[in-house]
Amino acid sequence: MKAERLEFHISYQCCNHCIFCSEKNRLKRFHGLNPTFREIADVLKKKKAEGFSYVTFTGGEPTASGNLPFSLKLAKLLGYRTAVTTNGYAFSDIEYCRKYLPLCDEIILSVHGPSAEIHDRLTGKNGNFERFRKTIGNIEKLDPERIYLITNTLLLKQNAGPLAELYNMICRFRCVKQCILSNPAPEGGAFTEYDSIAMPLHEAGKRAMELAGIVKKHGKIIKLFGFPACVLENPQECSNDFFWSPKVTVERSAAKGITGLREVYSERPVRRRHYSRKCSECAYREKCGGFFNLPH
C-alpha cells in the first residue's frame, strides 16, 4: 500500500526528561546530529516528487532545533500539509507562535496530567505544565478554528486517575479537535521502567474506555494507541489501529562509522508488537496491531 504520510525526525535534542521517553536511547546516540538544511531539503523535495502530501516534524523536541522554521517554510512552499509534535517548548512564547503557527496545519501537543505536580514529575522538569498551558492558550487566542490541535497523552499508573480532570479541562478549548491516549511502548526509557509505569493491560483498556467516554461527551475525537482490540469496547470506533494509514519515517542512522538518514516504511502499527495464538481467531486480526513485546 502506497504511503503519502511522512514522519521526519529533525531534532535529537529535548528539554525534558520523560520517564517513558521511547526516543531516549536515540536522543543520546545522535545528540548534536540533527539533519542539516541540505538533508531536510533533499528529503522533502524527493518525497514530494514521490507523491507524499503530509509531513509531521518530530524529534526529540523539534522546536528546540533551529531546523524547524526552515523545514516548515520549505514544506509549505512545496505544498505539504504540515504537523509538528511538541511539548510546547517554543510555542509557549506568543511571538514564536505568531510567527510560525501560520505555517502549521496540525499541532500534536503532549500533556500527561492536569497539574504541574503530575505533569512536571512525569516529564522530569519544573515549569513544563505552565509551558503547556501557555501553548494551548496561545493557539486558542491566535488560531483556534483553523489549527487542528491533537493532545497526546500516555496512560500510566501515575496518572490514570487524574486524567479525567485533564480531559474535562482541555476539551473546553475550541482549538482541541482530537485526543490521543496511548499505552506506553516498551522501548527507550520506558523499557527499563515498564513495570513501574504501565498498568495491567485489561485495567488499562477499561480505564482508556472510561476516559474516551469523557472526551466524546465534549464532542471531541478520541483515538487509543497501543491497546489490542480485545481490551477495548467497540475498537472500530476508537482504536487508532483501525484508522492507521501507511507512513514513512525518516530518521538519523549510523552504520560502520558513517552517519546518514534512513527510511522506515510502516504499513501497519505493529512496531514492538506481536500476536498471541488466540489472535488468529479474532475478527479484528487484520486491523489490530497486537500486543506490545514486553521486557522480561
Image (tube, grey):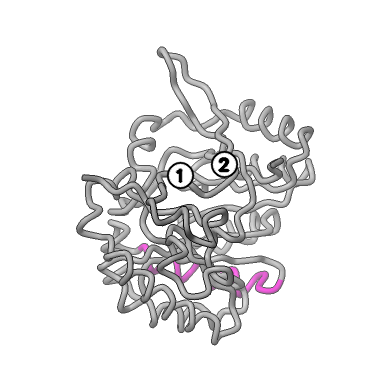
Towards the viewer: 60 or 5: 5
> Helix, strand or loop at disc 2?
strand
Quarter-wise, where is residue 87 in the image? bottom left
- Percent position (x, y) of residue 291? 39, 54
Density class for disc 2 (Cα within 10 Å; few <14, some 14-19, many ≥20) is some
Q: Quadrant of residue 31?
A: top left
Magenta range is: 128-145
The foreground one among 104 and 155 is 155
x and y percent of residue 115 in the render? 33, 75
Quadrant position of the C terminus in the picture: top left
Measuring 43% from the left and 60% from the top, which residue is drawn there?
228
Looking at the rendered structure, the kind of residue marked 1 is: Arg
Checking the image for residue 271, the label placed there is 1
Q: Is residue 136 visible?
A: no
Mark 2: amino acid: Ser
Magenta: main secondary structure:
helix
**Closer-to-camera residue (251/102):** 251
Q: Please, which residue is most extreme toward the bottom here?
A: 217
Q: Is residue 220 left or right of residue 211?
A: right
The N terminus: image quadrant: top right
Q: Is residue 254 above or below residue 25?
A: above
Q: x%, y% of residue 205?
A: 38, 70
User: Residue 266, which numbered label?
Assistant: 2
Residue 109's x, y, as percent? 50, 62
Say above or below: 62 vs 105: above
